[in-house]
Amino acid sequence: MSTRPMLSRTPSDLPWTTSNQHRFPQRRWRPLLMWMLLACTTIAIFQIGLRAGSPPTTFTVPEVSSSHPSALTFSTHPITRMMDEAEERFRAKVERQSKTLPEAIEEYKRRYGMPPPKGFDGWWEYTRKYDVVLVDEYDTLMRDLAPFYALRGKKELGDYSDNDEDPLRPGSGLDTNGWALGGGPEMRRRIAEVAGVSSIDLVRVRNGVPSTVSINKDGFVDDEVSARARGLKSMLGKCVAVLPDMDFPVNAKAEGRVIVPWDRWEVAGQDATTSDKIGLGMGNRTYIEVITDDKSNSAHPLSTFRPDWRGEGNVWDTWRRTCPPNSTARKFYASIRSAMLDSATSSHNPASRGGDDGSVPSSFTFAPSTSFNAISFCDQPHLHYTQGHFFSDWRTLGDLYPVLSPARAKGFGDIKIPSHYYYGSTDAYTYGWDEVNLELQPTDRGEVAWGDETDLGPNGEGGVDDRDLTIDPSYDGHTNTANPPKNRKTGKESKRNKIFWRGATTGGGNSPPGFAALYQRHRAVRMAGWDVEGDVEIWIPSTTSLLPNSSSSSTAKKSNYNDVRLTAHKVPAATLNKALMDVAFVKANNADQYPGGLEKLMAEHRFSGSVYLGGHWQYKYLLDLDGMSYSGRFMSFLASDSVPIKSTAYEEFFSEWIEPWLHYIPLSSSYEEIYNIFGYFSGIPAEVVEEVYGNATNPETGAPLFPPGTKIPAIPGAPDGDARLRRIARAGKQWKRTIGRTLDLESYVYRLALEWARLCADDRDAMTMKV
């Protein structure tokens, strides 16, 4: 048995540590006092700005903190609590859904302060016919659409007249519903304008027939009609016959396209205004229509729009203007690449320890949900370096335009629609797709049974050590499904107890260049590397509890193992990663964008062969990471019998339909808590215990902890940890079968289309249901 030294981390070991020693070049003394004062003032201002816009000494993300781990047991573990609360929360949500059309109408009016759109009764019949479960949960859709009720038409174009105005609010430009007058014609004008932008396609409805259209955009390479537009066209199939003529502009890119600056919003409550201008309850931010005398490009403001940045700005510089004027992001912006970030591009970021003041370590802070709402880039602008969408090459739209996109990051104004990856069926994105017979199967041919717990602790606790499995390296879950992993002791199929991920080096663009090493996928692959330095901290039972005759073991036998006190184990990251992580790139896209090029990229990240989608089902844990935008594989992961661990900065159409810690495991954008997630459900494999504790001594007797010839067991996780993990897998699969069906995607699009028809109508009141 080998002995690995327990490594202690110093601040200089941290990849996110930045040294101030050489932050700025020294100024030479000037012979004149005036120049000295000017130099000092410049340096002072620059220091303040850079501290506001640069990475901190440690990479942390504001998440809801867990309880202090000093008196921790599995009974009081935050994951136990969050799983129980998630189940109660989701059950209550399902039970409170409307049961009849009158109930649904009243709930709509209660939530949004106005009657439903015309055709709502037809949509309700659809939900009853196809057993749609969550019929009331459309708040994210309504928040996306709310600003467009403030679009105001032009009197001189005949969009409205003074007679249309609410007589109780003369001069307000609002109708009796609180909607801006002339909004329908203005909405249609903006749709026509944005349809001329590169990588924006139209789904057009005429006389109940849908079609896809791409406007001539001067030969730009993305002129072809996108798969996203074709996907939306297909999703309209069951409702298109009842829709009026209208157009939907669809984003052909994965990245968001619409960013509206802060000064174009009016926030209810800040200046004695109310939300009735737009929302009648739909939100507290009102879009401000800017009236100008400038006639240039008034017929088509986007006629000179260029598809990419071409060095004239970038997404972050545009996005930070969505923040309040007093926010850190607005006070300073580091627009150039800094040498301070170089130390962050090639190192492993081990899970951090708690502070000397007893603060909770970030490795023991569990995300209650995804990072869409958890991260404030306005308050912590340095975090933007870690999200690739801020470096997209594609130019964004700086005004309120209706653009339909499959996902939306914080601060963007795109309107969410279901992804075509979720609706169509392909080998790469669809669980159970039979490409021979062109049909979906209830069970994917690569699916592997969950397996037995055989590598147990002294009291019967523990889980499967992958060394107990017979692994056929040729098994791929696609062309070779004859010999899945099997347990040597039982002969039964068994999933491998590892965290698995494969993907390409996508994640962001190159505007400005030089930051690819900090993108979400690159950070994850480096952190999970098999040759990294440093150690991580996992809270699990003490190693002495593993000894058959130890006092702690006796205590564990006599009492509930859930109440055994957990302690912090410092484990070498490389040893742990080899045992629990199988994370690697399979393809180097745009390697020239990585600092140092392909050679540096290959040296700093693990690469492996491509894996069929069916090959993923060999693993219990499936890591799900953002790419250029959202992850298109999430629905297939949910449909499997494995558990998705999802880290994302995006909101999708189903975000309020699904429950984190019930249907999947959420992961912060720092990923640091992933080791304690594994430790809770699966403990530490015996192979890690052997290497780390093989030559350790028993603190009670001074004798070797494991005498020669002793079988070294795993350090177990929670007694019901594996059962809880499997419960998440089953709940996710059930969610996909009942709430994440293609029929539910169509229900969402049906509802969107009815709202869209009202927004585009000359008379919005006529397109409102009479109740």
Image (cartoon, rainbow, N blue to C red):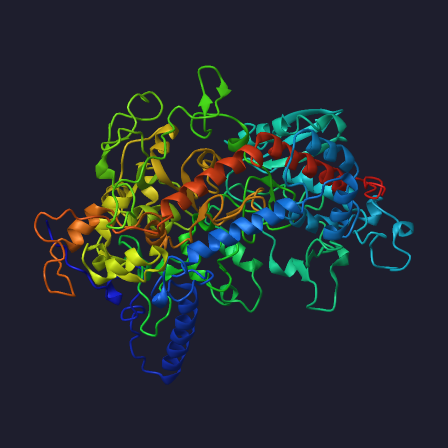
Give the position of the C terminus as an image quadrant: top right
Residue 410, given in percent of the width and then of the height, sits at 54, 53
Left or right: 420, with 311 as reference point: right
Residue 171, given in percent of the width and then of the height, sits at 86, 59
Foreground: 594 or 619?
Answer: 619
Residue located farthest toward the bottom when viewing the structure as drawn: 33
Residue located farthest toward the left when viewing the structure as drawn: 708
Is residue 462 something that shows in the picture?
A: yes
Is residue 334 something that shows in the picture?
A: no
Left or right: 596, with 694 as reference point: right
Left or right: 592, with 626 as reference point: left
Task: Judge whether 68 appears above or below 295 on screen.
Answer: below
Foreground: 274 or 286?
Answer: 274
Residue 646, given in percent of the width and then of the height, sits at 44, 45
Q: Residue at the spot x=36%, y=39% of the render?
A: 620
Left or right: 442, with 761 as reference point: left
Residue 737, given in percent of the width and then of the height, sits at 54, 32
Foreground: 464 or 61?
Answer: 464
Instruction: Report which quarter residue 739 is drawn in.
Output: top right
